[in-house]
Image: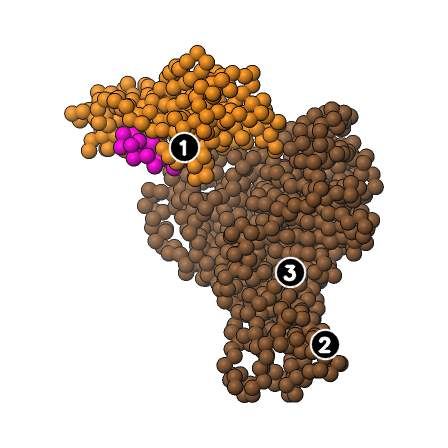
Chain colours: A orange, B brown
Amino acid sequence: MKPAPFEYVRPETLAEAVTALDHEDAKIIAGGQSLLPMMNFRLAQPERLVDINRIVELGQIEKTESGIRIGALVRHAEAARSDLLADHFPIIREAMPHVAHVAIRNRGTIAGSLCHADPAAEWPLLVTLLEGEIEILGGNGPRKAKPAEFFLAPLVTDIEETELVTGIYLPLPDAPCGMAFDEVAQRAGDFAVVAAGALVCVKGGQFAEVRLGLGGVFDTSVRGSALEKALTGKPATTEAIDSALPLAVEDLEPNDDLHASAAYRLSLVPVLARRVLTRAMKVAAT
Amino acid sequence: MTDATAYTRPKYVGQPVQRLEDPRLLTGRGRYTADIQLPRTVHLAFLRSNQAYARINKIDMEDARAVPGVIGIYAAADFGHIPDIEAPSKMENYRATACPVLARDLVRYVGEPVVAIVATSRYLAEDAAALIDIDYKPLDAAITARDALAENAPKLHPELPSNIILERVFATGDAPADIANAPHRVSGRFNLTRKTSVSTEPRAYLADYDAGKDELTLYDATNIPGIVRDELARLLNLDGNQIRVIAPDVGGSFGGKGSLYPEEVIVADLARRLDRPVKYVADRLEEITASSQAFGEEVEATLAFNADGRFLALEAEIIGDIGAYSIYPWTAALEPVQVASFLPGPYKTPAYRGRARGICTPKPPTGPYRGVGRPMAVFAMERLVDLAAAELGLCPVEIRRRNLAGADDFPHRIGSGLIWNRSGFQECLTAAEEAIDLPALQAEKAAGDKWIGVGFASYAELTGIGSRIAVAPGMPMNTGAETASVRIDATGAITAKFGISSHGQSLETTLAQIVAEELGVKPEDVRVVHGDTAASPNGTGTYASRSAVLGGGAAIKTTRALLKKVRRAAACLFDVDPDQVETGDGRIFVRGTNHSIDFKELARVVYADTTALPMDRRETLEAQETYDPFLGTTSSSTHVAVVEIDPETLAIKLRDFVVAEDCGKLINPLVVDGQVHGGVAQGVGAALLEELKFDETGQPITATLADYLVPTSAEMPPMHIRHVETELPDNPGGFRGMGEGGTIGATAAIANAIADAVSHLGLEINSLPITPNKLHALIAAGATQ
């Protein structure tokens, strides 16, 4: 379990990073929590590792007029600690303890999680739910991608090998809203069997906006669009949520794997959907 | 004048003495095999089989030899001078297997070492390994034990008559007839899937050869340094005094470091051939796929009982999936035969018939694992006991109370022939019952918001086994004696040497407590040396819950012999009778007089002073004694698990856990509790998480810690331990072994608790681990029936 030989480059600036990535077989290393195990198993054998940890500007969390920008190098633990994030997106602080274990949260980065694109991971679910944008930089300059464009399949994204994710942008919700996160994992810190996040706005006793994000039940994180549509405009009650739950499993195609059958995963979707939607509704109502 | 009566003789045995090894281990100053750096060391990597059962057609090493830093690449033919590893046994109906140190012609499991690569670094050795091409011809194989049992199953060892390499039957009375005639009976087929040890420290070996003296030192992460030394001497054709095996700090074994491995032999041999230190440190992948594995057993059993719930007869068929080879020195009989011999447990069951068979399959060899045989035996038996209770509408506590051997029943012989001596079977059950509020839990269960389950498991185990009984069936090796030597050197310092070794048992502390108490010094004054074959002429190591009883017994016997010498020498110095000399607090004194010296002064007088004592009274302040308990002593316990299952997600939460145990006299309650906690953690793993899975071609599919799940602190329940001390066993310290019990009871208690929690669904919990996913499948299957 030792990696194959590789060349190691450590740029100090984004421009140097882009230059370093202009190579036939380069990989970015940030927290190393997914890449290094794969290299140790020799499942990944990049010729060049581009270490971006020295690029200071990638480590910031900043508020802009309409949203919050989180730099690619922000660690899960930093995101959990950030009061700025917690003030606007309390769901992030709620979700972070589910990201693996303390040591991994201290090193692992947001961009690393997004680029690894595990369909059960928390960050892909969060950016999907929060309708964020992924900011990407390459030789042709910067571009942005929506989650649906970025996540293509399990462990497959839209990013080119010569590009790097520089951060994510999360737009502030238009109106006050409630958010909630929950997941079922076999052990504390394991990848979720199923994860669910909700964002709910209530106006005049009715659901003004409903978002449901699900992880672990499809090739990528997904939104429960049918349920969202059905609930919007309905009275904000637990009964309304309960009656919409069958829609939550529509079009989901979870896989069987070692730890959970597709049937078990599907059985968890309405349970977790109800829990997060109900909780988010109650927060939104207060 | 000093008042000698002021010296005290504090009791150290039984006290929560802080661990003496902790300052070293907790500040990162432990010295493990991988930490040891020797000049000119070369590193070993293995290319292992990626086939379950295949013929090796050709190995192409040409490209690999060209990798810079490569020193040598070796295949089976390069070790033709080393005999195959075979585990002999006097057991009837047993066939040893021949295990070459590198696979020769055939590979028999994924992970079996085929090529050894030596390079100046492990990285380079692995780069070279990646360039070696082995051409395999896959062979038909029976992957599961059931398939391998079939008459026409392809044989894994063509030279053996079949895949069944061992069979043993235990019988008392006519169990089949009694079962047929009994008014009530319950049956089940129970399955404990394969596990592995997952020590924090993987296996590691470093061999250092001194060509000038033709002496070999092997630093070895093992818990059986003596056994390794003895067998290496035979395999490498050396004398024992040419090999020293040192187990430095060892980061856990749980049985996984308790057998002889081909890698150890190769490291030792190559160090001599290359005349350079050779190091091998297993990585986690190798640890999971190529260290000895555990369990892999199926028990089909029937328990018959009368209308009062009293057991009449028990019958069982046990199949052990022992893997590719019968492991040295324990043999493949260790696990399955122990399942059969312990199955009747602590209960009075007049008739018994149990048959154990061990089946070769193309998987890694099974070996010892904390609890050996008993986790499976207790799981099967305790499920049957609960099924019997349910059939009669009896409380699980009551049916156990009616059948456990009581104070008047000892010595109690069970149907397999094992004899229990006095132990607190009933007392532990009572103490466990008192530690939980059963009516409150039952009321909560009845409320039905959560599925609450309470599970009991009672067991007995034989520990501290003496020379009368082989630890593994028919093993031609005496595992029943241990030697200690305790010396006071010329500086007055005390060193106690043992043949046992420690891989987490706190023996540096507990043995020092014993020596200190016997000699009249403080525990921190006693330096314990163990895990080094130079420390003792003979010693087999630490396993089978033996070291407190055997090592502790040897410590007492030896220290008492040394104390006699101390008193003789001091008596001569003080000019009194030796009986008047006392020791305590590091002083040697005569009560009511001003005769008082410390051990330093005594050492000076004996070793350095040529005038104080006559020459013939200057005896060496050292003693060496061997202790053999001849029989074993019975440890027992009742475990109670309380589980809570979320009816919607089926998430299983262990809410509470009780262990009431009789381990005789406690040497150190902190250490005993720690052993119980750790053992229960492994029981939690076996019951809820840990499972080595293989696909239909024999490929391991749980080869990382992301797929092979072990419990973390987050999965552990609050634990309540009750120590029950009944009549002490007949050994010098009154100790019973307690290193494995946590694992033995917890697995079954959790299984029973889950069965209780889902009893309203009529589900059978008969295969472990049980997970939310498996519960979902069981419920779905039940719903479609």
- Secondary element at tag 1: loop
Residue furthest toward the left?
Answer: A204
Reply above or below: A254 against B363.
above
Range of the magenta residues? Answer: A80-98
- The mark that comes first in sequence, 3 or 2, is 3
- The subunit carrying tag 2 is B
Residue B181 visible in the snapshot: no
Which residue is at 46% across, 58% downward? B721
- Secondary element at tag 2: loop
Reply above or below: A162 against B199.
above
Task: Report which quarter residue B69 is drawn in.
Answer: top right
- Looking at this view, is B474 or B27 the one in front? B27
Q: What residue type is labelled 1?
A: Arg
Task: Report which quarter residue A202 is drawn in.
Answer: top left
Image location of residue A226, percent across then percent down:
32, 19
- Looking at this view, is B468 or A217 the one in front? A217
CA distance for labels 3 and 2: 23 Å
Image location of residue B197, percent across then percent down:
59, 44
- The subunit carrying tag 1 is A
- What residue does disc 1 label? A75
CA distance for labels 1 and 3: 46 Å
Residue A51 visible in the snapshot: yes
- Looking at this view, is B83 or B151 the one in front? B83
Which residue is at 51% across, 74% downward? B10
Q: Which amino acid does label 2 sit on?
A: Glu
Image location of residue B541, percent across then percent down:
67, 56
> Which one is in front in this view, the residue at disc 3 or the one at disc 2?
2
The numbered dot on residue B529 is 3
Q: Is residue B420 magenta?
A: no
- The subunit carrying tag 3 is B
Image location of residue B766, percent across then percent down:
53, 42
- What residue does disc 2 label? B619
